[in-house]
Amino acid sequence: MYGQTAISDNYITSPARTDLSGRLLDEMKDLYYGHFYNFWFLSLLEQNAFDSSRLRYIHNMLDVQSDYHPDSIVFSEGIEAIDELILTSKRYLLPALRDKLGISGFSRNSRNTKEDLVMRNMFCYTFPYNLQRLEELVTELKKAVK
């Protein structure tokens, strides 16, 4: 009986802490899947020293249900992977994003459709803000998990 109490206590958290991390995870999930989980971004990450297997940790963390304990390994791996994604994006992608997406004035876009160019332009213009917002959410999540 004593062992069962100790095990179940590991998964009990305060309601405020669970609500905060749940809200943050919902916002982060919407932002990540809405703006970062697309073909252009993922292919650019793979070209620029980001281990694509780290995406699995991000997906595992974002798909967590509310009954997980915030100190679990899922959160630590997911937060670490998102931190790496943000660092890689700032270091390698932001300085030359238009060139890498093939939408600068110096690139030839004969194989891209107009819709594709419009989507890439929108991604390029919104990417810095979305990256900053993702970083803010991760910082808040780190505080909520601790």
Image (tube, rainbow, N blue to C red):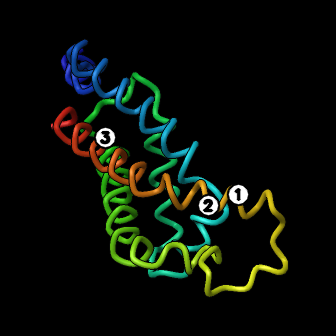
Sequence-earlier tag: 3 or 2? 2
Residue at 58% over, 42% down = 34
Residue at 45% over, 29% down = 26
Identity of the amino acid at label 1? Val
Left or right: 8 with respect to 124? left
Indicate the quadrant where residue 16 lies.
Answer: top left
Q: Could you tell me which quadrant the N terminus lies in?
A: top left
Residue 139 percent across, percent down from the top left: 22, 44
* Residue contact between numbered discs 1 and 3, judged by CB atoms under 8 Å: no
For label 3, the residue is: 137
**How many neighbours does mark 3 have within 10 angstroms: few (below 14), some (14-19), or many (20 or more)?**
some
Sequence-earlier tag: 1 or 3? 1
Which residue is nearer to you in this view: 131 or 21?
A: 131
For label 2, the residue is: 121
Provide the secondary structure element on which disc 3 rests: helix
Which residue is nearer to you in this view: 31 or 100?
A: 100
Provide the secondary structure element on which disc 1 rests: helix
* Residue contact between numbered discs 2 and 1, judged by CB atoms under 8 Å: yes
In whole angstroms, how far apart are the C-alphas of marks 2 and 1? Answer: 5 Å
* Residue contact between numbered discs 3 and 2, judged by CB atoms under 8 Å: no
